[in-house]
Image: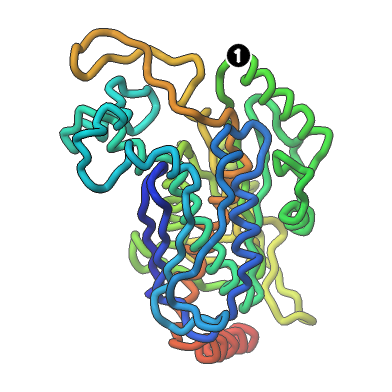
Amino acid sequence: MMKFQTSGESHGQGLVAILSGIPAGLRIDFDSVNLDLRRRMRGYGRGGRMKIESDTAQFLSGVRHGVTIGSPITILIENRDWANWKQAMSVEDQPETRALYRPLSSPRPGHADLAGCLKFNFRDARYVLERASARETAARVGAGGVARLFLREFGMEVASHVVAVGRVSLPPGAVSFDAILALREDEETLLNCVDRAVEQRMKAEVDSATENRDTVGGVFEVRARGVPPGLGTCAQWDEKLDGQVAQAVMSIQAVKGVEIGSAVENVARFGSEVQDEIGYDRSARRFTRKSNRAGGIEGGMTNGEEIVVKGFLKPISTLRRPLESVDFVTRNPVKAAYERSDVCVVPAAGVVGEAMVALVLARALLEKFGGDSMDETLRNYRAYLEQVERF
């Protein structure tokens, strides 16, 4: 059973991801993992924090001489900003410097501040926001980078692109997977959009939000190709793969909606227009589809087509033009506290979405094929593909 956890605070010493269940024998491409971390930091409309950090994955366990050894993989990503927060975020109690603890007593609308303080009985939202912060997703991307390398051994690839920023979106029409994948190495495409002209309009949307001291949301799409049919199951509600994918993407900070395939468009169509009709390619000895409106998942299982999932990102909640709030102590109306933040994070959220989808697919693959070593898992996988071909 593959699983992962993250720990660490936004301005603490660092972030940690622990990934267990990856078979022994997987060669780790450290440059690939660090590229994903850099991609998460890129984007038009990012804030000052990204000028401070230089995220790099330090593998502390589970890897020897560049190859996994079957034990839990521990990844550390240091926070450079920790140097400015050592006293405010000190683990040990330091009464003599309590004036420097930077408490936050006016919760910010749209954040976890108020709900978390009520839950944990805090009068200082700093205790909540440090963990609820999207800075935590750097650890997810580190773990997802390993999952991506694992999936590649089975011919699978995961990529993302930005579909919309604010009121600007790509026109309807198919976008090739190769065009999306090419964005991964393209440092000039700041909003991770396949259409340069549309990206310029997206940048103008971000500029407008910046000038108004506001923020802007959008939509990212994650695609996965090379996924075989049969991952996931229809047997139990919590084992359905589409449910797991939706939960994983929804867990990303500021994501408030998830779509698999063309679900939103499908609701306004008749059933005869929505279902993906089935054919058979005798030369390739495989079943085919005339369309992929289901987004590669039917009945909780992959059907062999591309996985297509969108994340709908609200405008992030930290505004340079603070909204109304209430002080925890006085209960009087105040303006919400302002923490340094971004204006647009849609491209970064897409990279996190890739990581989460890769982690879900890797777990589903291991649940189906098992294996303590890569040789064993690959052997099981190839035997299954032969079974599918002989069907």
Q: Is residue 228 visible from the viewing direction of this image?
A: no
Residue that lies at the very extreme toward the left in this rendered image: 121
Give the side of residue 80 with respect to residue 178, left or right: left
Give the side of residue 112 with respect to residue 185, left or right: left
The number of numbered badges drawn on the structure is: 1
Against 56, is 194 above or below? above
Crowding at dot 1, Cα within 10 Å, few <14 / some 14-19 / many 20+, comes out as few
Which residue bears the numbered disc 1?
Answer: 212
Q: Residue at x 48, y 56 (%)?
A: 77
Q: Is residue 382 visible from the viewing direction of this image?
A: yes
Quadrant that contains the N terminus: bottom left
Amino acid type, callout 1: Asn
Quadrant that contains the C terminus: bottom right
**Viewer-nearest residue: 106 or 279:** 106
Residue 220 image point, x, y percent: 61, 43
Residue 290 image point, x, y percent: 72, 59
Quarter of the image for residue 72 reads bottom left
Quarter of the image for residue 45 reads top right
Residue that lies at the very extreme toward the right in this rendered image: 197
Q: Residue at x 36, y 40 (%)?
A: 130
Residue 296 image point, x, y percent: 59, 60
Residue 202 image point, x, y percent: 72, 29
Give the side of residue 300 with respect to residue 145, left or right: left
